[in-house]
Image (tube, grey):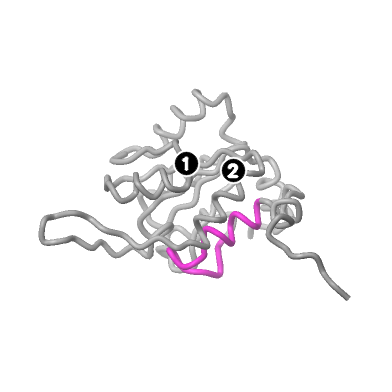
Amino acid sequence: MISLNDTQARARRLKLMAFDVDGVLSEGSLFYTDEGIEMKAFNSLDGLGMHMLQSAGITVAIITGRTARCVELRMQNLGIDILYQGVSNKLEALHDLLAKQGISIDEAGYMGDDIVDLKIMGACGFSAAPADCHEAVKPYARMLSSKIGGRGAVREVCEFILDAQGKLDAVLAPYLPALTK
């Protein structure tokens, strides 16, 4: 049984958080136009959550097995420039990224939802999954979101990490109006 204290301690050490796309940043459905262009729906809550991580000094990366132009465009919109698409070995991609960033595996986290994510989730210091992840993923997730993929799960995980690091209040402060009596 994974304890909340251990999960918080692991989240406290994070310097980098990486995310899968299909089933995590999107709800997992793949839409194609008649011209063969792939489309996905992204949740704005999740996007702001990743932006909040970045503003708190945590590097955000995307490591996904599929390649889609819409993912590239969404990450550009969010200011996320670390994007690994078409990756068959996600753990190898993470090791490459960590070497470039000078970050240890214990300081890295990954959020995935399916069996292709198990190796990377098992290797990272912190791991998370949306509520609707594959059953085999649940034992590997240090944090299991109460939300489903593409519907706020990423935001919940981002806020958990920020709270564990004592940064959530400072990140939220610019958005909150002053209380009046």
Could you classify mark 2 by the number of other residues whose Cα lies within 10 Å: few (under 14), some (14-19), or many (20 or more)? some
Q: Position of residue 134 (x, y in %)?
A: 40, 63
User: In terms of depth relative to the viewer, which is nearer, 142 or 101?
Assistant: 101
Q: Which residue is mark 1?
A: 80
Q: Position of residue 20 (x, y in %)?
A: 41, 50
Q: Residue at x 38, y 52 (%)?
A: 21
Could you classify mark 1 by the number of other residues whose Cα lies within 10 Å: few (under 14), some (14-19), or many (20 or more)? some
The residue type indicated by label 1 comes to Ile
Report helix, strand or loop for mark 2. helix
User: In terms of depth relative to the viewer, which is nearer, 130 or 69?
Assistant: 69
Q: Would residue 82 appear left or right of 38 to someone viewing this image?
A: right
Number of labels in the image equals 2
Report helix, strand or loop for mark 1. loop
Q: Residue at x 40, y 38 (%)?
A: 83
Which residue is situated farthest in the left direction here?
A: 34
Tag 1 and tag 2, C-beta contact below 8 Å: yes
Tell me where residue 142 sits by quadrant: bottom right
Query: Was residue 150 drawn as part of the magenta stretch in this picture?
Result: yes
User: In terms of depth relative to the viewer, which is nearer, 84 or 41?
Assistant: 41
Quadrant of the frame with the C terminus:
bottom right
Q: Which residues are magenta?
A: 144-161
The residue type indicated by label 2 comes to Gln
Q: Residue at x 51, y 53 (%)?
A: 140
Q: Position of residue 52 (x, y in %)?
A: 61, 50
Quadrant of the frame with the N terminus:
bottom right
Q: Spatial distance from mark 1 to mark 2, Cα to Cα? A: 9 Å
